[in-house]
Image: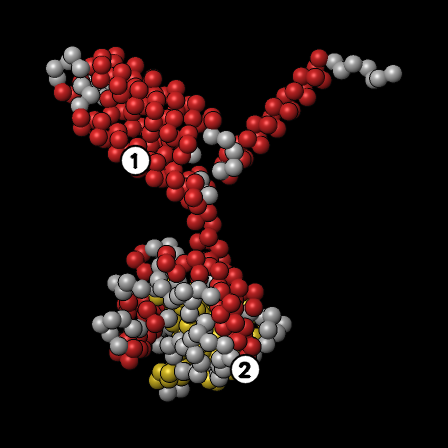
Amino acid sequence: MTGAAETPTARMRKALHRARTSVRKAGVDYFRGDGSDWVALTALLLSVPALALGTIAQPDWCAPAALVLPIVAGGLLLRPASLLGLYSAAAAALIAEAQVLDPYEEGAERVTPGTILVVAAVAFFGLLIAQFRSRVGVPWRRGGTMLFDLRERIRVQSKLPKLPHGWHREMALRPAGGQSFSGDFVVAARTNGGRTLEVVLTDVSGKGMDAASRALLLSGAFGGLLGSLPPHDFLHAANGYLLRQDWDEGFATSVHLVLDLDSGDYDLFSAGHVPGLHLSAGSGRWEEKSAEGPLLGVYDGAEFEPVRGTLRRGDVLMLFTDGLVETSERELTEGMDRLTGEADRYVTSGFHGAAWHLIEAVAKDVNDDRALLLICRD
């Protein structure tokens, strides 16, 4: 004996639940780029005859070139195969408009050769956009969100940890060409129970968007390595990781700071990076800190020897990438002198908020990625 028959209300609730689930799933798939585009195609196909009728009825208000509107939307929403169907409908509408409007003598109310060329050109570029989206596999609805998410991930990974009282840290990063992505990045962590600060500043070959994808991949890998290995093994592991990627342009320069927050003693490892600068409060002079080590990703078995120092009260350690001090028109020595000259302005007032202003003063218009890291002991 089967259970009692369901009431009409229960059946209706189940039907509504299934409908909501189907609509929700279709919506999620569509915005991921996995679902069918029939809804958008249907809406755009209906808009084509509506625009054609509007053009025939009121050509002064709805010009024949208005057919580019569904074509532009189709280039952003539809797959290439569906887009061709939309183009066929637009072409038929254009032919119909030409047949009806041709008796008019005023050019503004006719389908002219220029109108046809405009619609065809927009359709061509719309097809290129659709094919690019199809090849990449990222719909336009999610493409901008994905890039924004990648940019924010780089920023989060580049955040410096809080330091104990008596220490100040800040970093400024300025990509080439005013872009949002850079080939320079920083990863940092407090290790050894919080008593040690480890910071890695890396400059990936290339600049701007060309190096951003590799910078994102390396920042995630370096962030995982940092603190998981003894400090003297970090650059060895990073070098091996780059070699395994086998990139055509896969080298990078990097500097690894290991700072004891109790004593102020530090080790500075370098992989082909520009020297750091240490300001001694006692003498008021800047000293170059240049460690030995080859570029990352060039050859296996590289050795990295650190240079050591101590940050005392009032001392400042400045690390940066070569875009800040070296250009095609300016040698490294000249750039270092200019940077220290500008940095001397902050010796008496303190270096709080100085990183960004130093980039502005030294390398504002340089078409290269620039990054500057300041560690100060108050």
Q: Estimate how packed mark 2 is, as few (under 14), some (14 to 19) or many (20 or more) residues with alpha carbons within 10 Å.
A: few
Residue kind at label 2, given as amino acid type: Ser
Mark 1 secondary-structure assignment:
helix
Q: Position of residue 110 (x, y in %)?
A: 18, 19
Measured as percent of width and height from the top left, residue 24 is found at 57, 30
Q: Which mark is residue 151?
A: none
- State the separation of the CA atoms marked 1 and 2: 66 Å
Residue 158 falls left or right of residue 76: right
Q: Where is residue 319 in the image (x, y as percent from the top left)?
A: 40, 74
In front: label 1 or label 2: 1
Residue located at (44% from left, 64% from top): 247
In the rendered view, would you say 137 is above or below 46? below
Q: Residues within 10 Å of mark 1 (few under 14, many from 20)?
A: some
Residue ID for mark 2: 263
Q: Residue at x 28, y 80 (%)?
A: 333
When the figure is inspected, residue 225 is found, relative to residue 31, above or below; the finding is below
Instruction: Give the answer, above or below, for where 315 lies relative to 79.
Output: below
Could you say which quadrant of the image residue 330 lies in?
Answer: bottom left
Q: Which residue lies furthest to the left in this view?
A: 105
Residue at which label 1 appears: 124
